[in-house]
Amino acid sequence: MSKKEPFFNLYHHNFIRAAVAVPELRVADPGFNAQKTMDLLGQAADQHSLLIAFPELGLSAYSCDDLFQQQALLDACQEGLRQILKYSEKLPLIGIVGLPLQVEHLLFNCAAVFYRGRLLGIVPKTYVPNYREFYELRQFAPADYALRERIDLCGQKEVPFGNRLLFQVAEQPLLTFYVEICEDLWSPIPPSSYAALAGATVLINLSASNITVGKDDYRRLLANSQSSRCLAAYLYTAAGTGESTTDLAWDGHGMMYENGDCLAETERFSYVSQLALGDIDLDRLQQDRMRQNSFGQTRSRHRDLLTSFQTIRFSVPLPAQKPVPLKRAYERFPYVPSDPISRDRRCQEVYDIQTQGLVKRLQAAGVDKVVIGISGGLDSTQALIVCARVMDIMKLPRSHVLAYTMPGFATSKRTLSQARRLMAAVGCQAHEIDIRPSCLQMLKNLGHPYAQGEPVYDVTFENVQAGERTSHLFRLANLHRALVVGTGDLSELALGWCTYGVGDHMSHYHVNASVPKTLIQYLIGWVAQKQQLGPEAGAILKEIRATDISPELIPQESKEQPGQRSEEVIGPYELQDFHLYYLLRFGYSPAKVAFLAWSAWHDRTYGTWPGIPENRRNQYPLVEIKRWLEVFLKRFFQFSQFKRSCLPNGPKVGSGGSLSPRGDYRAPSDSEVTAWLTQLEQIPDREPPAIHINRGNEERLFHRLLVARRQSID
């Protein structure tokens, strides 16, 4: 992408907008059904969709039974297809419709793929069911019965025909799609599995699928699982209102998944036509396939079969001449679910992972005590909660947690009070060591101006305090035969906001190393809300959560509150954690990360918030996002890797959250950041005067889908 290209156009960030359609229909009335299909084609084009899929046998209706053996119906279906092709000539939209087709004396249940009036290919159904309420073999032949690979249809010659066709857009080769039909997904090895290995990133299922009690959940499970296993997007659309209810009922279930995440879903049992839109992130699919190398190994194992797929490459100019913002809703806090039920489950699991890690380390080391520094801030509070849980699990008294608060030159009355009261409420051994005398002695030894009374607060002044605290903790651990528990977090490690070596960078075991700052805030709030440490501790935890984040290393005029604010230097943690997630988990370009950040953060009134009061909800214009993203890129890629290359041990908590060289992330300590900063320059400094984001029902859908999305930390 260059600055001349519309930054606010989703297609320039390797998204595509797709649609699943469930039109109203009539049984054995292809003319009516074609008109309803064209209505939805036009609506999808108006919404800048590039691709739309319709249900199985949508031109005839699925429930025609032996009417499929009537020539009048078959001819009318072809006429309906001709009308649709004619109508589509002026639409910048790829369409896929279902109809019955006669080919060499056999009848096939087919999907017709077309663009601007041209038939790109015809895909017959691979697996034709003949069990329970399904009698398709009575009318239709399976795809493997076909002898021809090309057919003539609707006046077009040599149209590709078969169930191993891939369709690729020349202008966006990441959009390679494959079509299968209904039962194909229900088979032990769906044809789309091989298609994904052959290169398809978007898998499409034209289905009829009558409804029975509980079947909707099973469909979701199938589509979700197939998208996850194939590292693909999966579009599914099933027949709805108008199908025959002689013996069956139909709920019109359309849905769209992207590697396990539900992007869109229709309203079931609607009595009008429906269109559900979703923005598919093709970069995500490519990145996941690149990282999960078993995908490539599976391709190698099935090489002979995969080479039988034919790729139909065709040109589709992308709708890129004006801004097309995302309809897709991105959570502002990717590490923190907005849905309260999911958030509770997440918090419990994070604590379980951290606790198990420390229990095992203590058992392996043969010690039963831990030493921890308590500042009265977020990170040390989180680590102390974990330590208390560990002692409870190991059936040891909490007095085996040796907690030390060590006020320095800039410690405020608020944080010192919080540290004292927290240690007392938890029931650990509480100690207090004033490090100012020993720090002053070191500053004298160094010849630092502060030792002579000059107010010089440089990095040496700060690190002497951080180092003195850590030095005390390690020697205390020696004295009491204990392990030092680390109190940093993932966000600080990403930004290099820690003192290397003999400082808060080091510990014997780092329970928070994979937990970002934004998640720690919610973990502490969750413990307070559930009163897991009692009401007294709960009240203190709420105070700590509301305290400004500060290293408290530089003296301020006020002694009451923390004056030195971390976020004034390194940026808002809520924004930097967003950047961290998409750079670390997916390796996105800076321009794409900024586009996602703008989409999520530029309007505080849109979308869901994870329990944040309205008066504390922030929003960020693009210029501010760009500013703090530059800070992140420099600190992450150029300045801080040497600190991460020698991290202490600690448990990996989420698949999008580990910087340990033994876990998710390995990188040289002396790399350059030029490539990232060059791409950063492609980001405009401001947004256009007005961009209207017509999300329609997407916000309500977002609320509904949050519960259905994967519960793992991505």
Image (cartoon, rainbow, N blue to C red):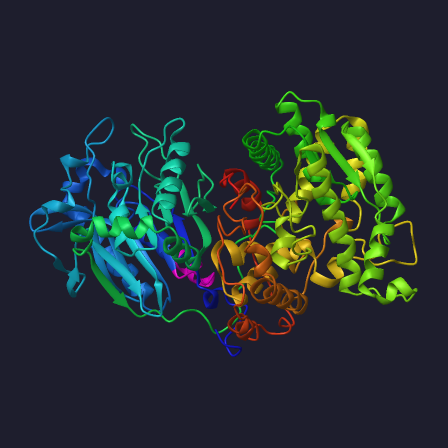
- Residue 522 is situated, as x and y percent measured from the top left of the image, at 68, 41
514 lies above or below 479: below
558 lies above or below 252: below
Q: Residue furthest top?
A: 395
Q: Is residue 638 visible?
A: yes
- Residue 344 is situated, as x and y percent measured from the top left of the image, at 62, 34
Stretch of the chain drawn in magenta:
40-50
Q: Is residue 532 visible?
A: no
- Residue 118 is situated, as x and y percent measured from the top left of the image, at 25, 66
x 49%, y 60%: residue: 667
Judging depth in this view, the residue of 713 and 435 nearest the camera is 435
Judging depth in this view, the residue of 459 and 106 nearest the camera is 459
Our reading of the magenta stretch's main secondary structure is: helix
Residue 41 belongs to the span the image colors magenta:
yes
x 13%, y 59%: residue: 151
- Residue 316 is situated, as x and y percent measured from the top left of the image, at 34, 69
